[in-house]
Image (cartoon, helix red, strand yellow):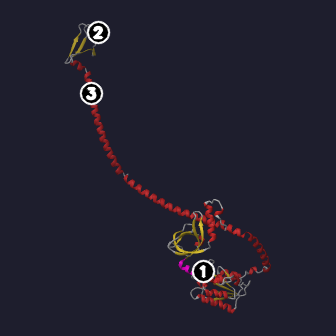
């Protein structure tokens, strides 16, 4: 991977580019490794991916394990579980978080077997038991096939089914042996030695069905590895499922992912034998050499470009981002619900204070105060009106004719009209004179103007 010398450049990085370069550097520097710790903050969104932290007494690291790898596990992790995680070092670009991308997980009990497995694998590899120089070729068309497995297991049935379909005329010799338990390894060794001593077949299949690491442990014993290495008959291992690897797989001359696949590898398809194998092989060899020369020119660049731009990686990152949003949304929804609950409680208290009984009592008190205020206003108004009436009565009394009469004057009328001048009368007119006390009806004798 190309690295950048910061001291030799003035280039300014964006945050996205910096995180991407750091991720490439981490993934290109660290190999796949095993990390042991305790699970905490485990989360499993609807996508099927797992997110958690792996911690020990003084540190922790974020981890992600995607759905395709999760489905191969026989258990679901939970907080507090002590595990061993097979992972690659990476960086989540969206947040710049250092993280581990899990490929496989084992509980610590199984992890001890894994440590023993790795230690034996390293020791045998250093001793040369895995070297390709010691691998023996298989005959193109075997004359007899030997199978070392349990005669009652599913593996032998799968092998016989494949042979019956592909090469039914091939003789099969079964060397029965237990394939699980503490005594299985010596029996397997004895079966390999028996087959080599009898020389009844020209290829051997060492097989059993899938199981846990503990179930497959007889195939991880050193005595079995040495027996396979010393066998003069080429051996193909077909132990467990495709994801299972044992020490026997590395020592054997060839490894098949399953017992059925082992039967297919050692036998030709009878329908294809009608074609001239030698001529096809030569033509294929020339084509392969030509393609190899072409591919070697671009393989390095294509591999690097694929690792950086592969849609599967980008999809995994986007899926992780979506899961982060989903978890964040769940937290926000919970927070919003809590806030609404608090608001509802406050409104309930306020509503209790606004009950109709309280409101009616308050309105009644206000009405009483207003009635008292109205009564006071009416009393003051009545007093003012009485005072004004008395004043007007006094003024009216001063202007009343009765007051004038009291002072010795009289009022003279003719035909109910007040006389103000003597020329309003003639001799003989009847007039009426009103006095202070009583009145007079008189006749005019003479009018003096």
Residue of label 1: 118
* Residue where numbered disc 2 is placed: 423
Relative image position of residue 156 (x, y in whole percent): 64, 84
Tell me which segment is drawn in magenta: 107-121
Q: Which mark is residue 55?
A: none
| Residue holding disc 3 | 391
Query: Marks 2 and 1: CB-CB under 8 Å?
Result: no
Few, some or many C-alpha atoms within 10 Å of disc 1 (few <14, some 14-19, many ≥20)?
A: few
Q: Secondary structure at mark 3?
A: helix
Q: Residue at x 25, y 25 (%)?
A: 394
Q: Is residue 111 found inside the magenta-colored segment of the image?
A: yes
- Is residue 208 something one can see in this rendering? no
Near-viewer residue (369 or 171): 369
Question: Where 439 falls versus 153 (above or below)?
Answer: above
Residue 242: % across, % down: 63, 77
Which image quarter is the N terminus in? Answer: bottom right
- Dot 2 alpha-carbon crowd within 10 angstroms: few under 14, some 14 to 19, many 20 or more: few
The quadrant where residue 301 appears: bottom right
Q: Residue at x 64, y 87 (%)?
A: 226
Q: What residue is at 75 percent from the left and 73 percent from the top? A: 292
Task: Residue lying at the far left in this picture: please name it.
Answer: 437
Question: Real-space Cα distance between discs 2 and 1?
Answer: 158 Å
């Amino acid at each position: 991977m190309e690295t950048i010398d910061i001291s030799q450049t003035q280039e300014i990085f964006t945050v996205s580019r910096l995180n991407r370069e750091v991720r490439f550097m981490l993934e290109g520097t660290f190999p796949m490794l095993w990390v042991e710790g305790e699970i905490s903050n485990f989360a499993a969104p609807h996508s099927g991916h797992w997110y958690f932290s792996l911690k020990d007494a003084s540190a922790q690291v974020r981890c992600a394990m995607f759905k395709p790898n999760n489905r191969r596990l026989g258990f679901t992790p939970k907080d507090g579980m002590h595990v061993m995680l097979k992972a690659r070092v990476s960086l989540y670009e969206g947040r710049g978080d250092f993280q581990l991308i899990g490929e496989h997980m084992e509980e610590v009990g199984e992890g001890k077997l894994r440590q023993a497995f790795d230690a034996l694998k390293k020791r045998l590899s250093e001793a040369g038991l895995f070297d390709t120089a010691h691998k023996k070729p298989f005959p193109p068309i075997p004359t007899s096939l030997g199978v070392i497995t349990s005669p009652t297991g599913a593996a032998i049935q799968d092998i016989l089914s494949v042979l019956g379909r592909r090469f039914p005329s091939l003789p099969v010799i079964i060397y029965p042996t237990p394939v699980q338990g503490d005594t299985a390894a010596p029996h397997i060794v004895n079966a390999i030695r028996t087959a080599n001593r009898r020389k009844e077949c020209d290829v051997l299949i060492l097989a059993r069905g899938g199981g846990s690491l503990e179930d497959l442990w007889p195939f991880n014993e050193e005595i079995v590895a040495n027996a396979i290495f010393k066998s003069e008959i080429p051996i193909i291992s077909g132990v467990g499922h495709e994801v299972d690897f044992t020490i026997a797989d590395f020592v054997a001359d060839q490894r098949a992912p399953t017992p059925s696949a082992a039967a297919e590898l050692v036998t030709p398809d009878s329908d294809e034998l009608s074609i001239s194998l030698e001529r096809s092989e030569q033509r294929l060899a020339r084509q392969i050499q030509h393609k190899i020369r072409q591919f070697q020119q671009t393989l390095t660049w294509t591999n690097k470009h694929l690792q950086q731009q592969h849609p599967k990686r980008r999809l995994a990152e986007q899926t992780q981002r979506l899961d982060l949003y989903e978890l964040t949304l769940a937290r926000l929804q919970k927070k919003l619900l809590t806030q609404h609950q608090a608001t509802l409680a406050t409104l309930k208290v306020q509503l209790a204070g606004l009950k109709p009984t309280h409101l009616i009592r308050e309105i009644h008190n206000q009405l009483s105060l207003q009635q008292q205020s109205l009564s006071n206003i009416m009393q003051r108004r009545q007093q003012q009106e009485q005072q004004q009436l008395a004043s007007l009565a006094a003024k009216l009394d001063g202007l009343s004719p009765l007051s004038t009469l009291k002072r010795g004057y009289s009022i003279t009328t003719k035909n109910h009209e007040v006389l103000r001048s003597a020329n309003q009368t003639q001799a003989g007119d009847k007039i009426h004179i009103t006095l202070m006390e009583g009145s007079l009806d008189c006749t005019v004798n003479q009018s003096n103007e």
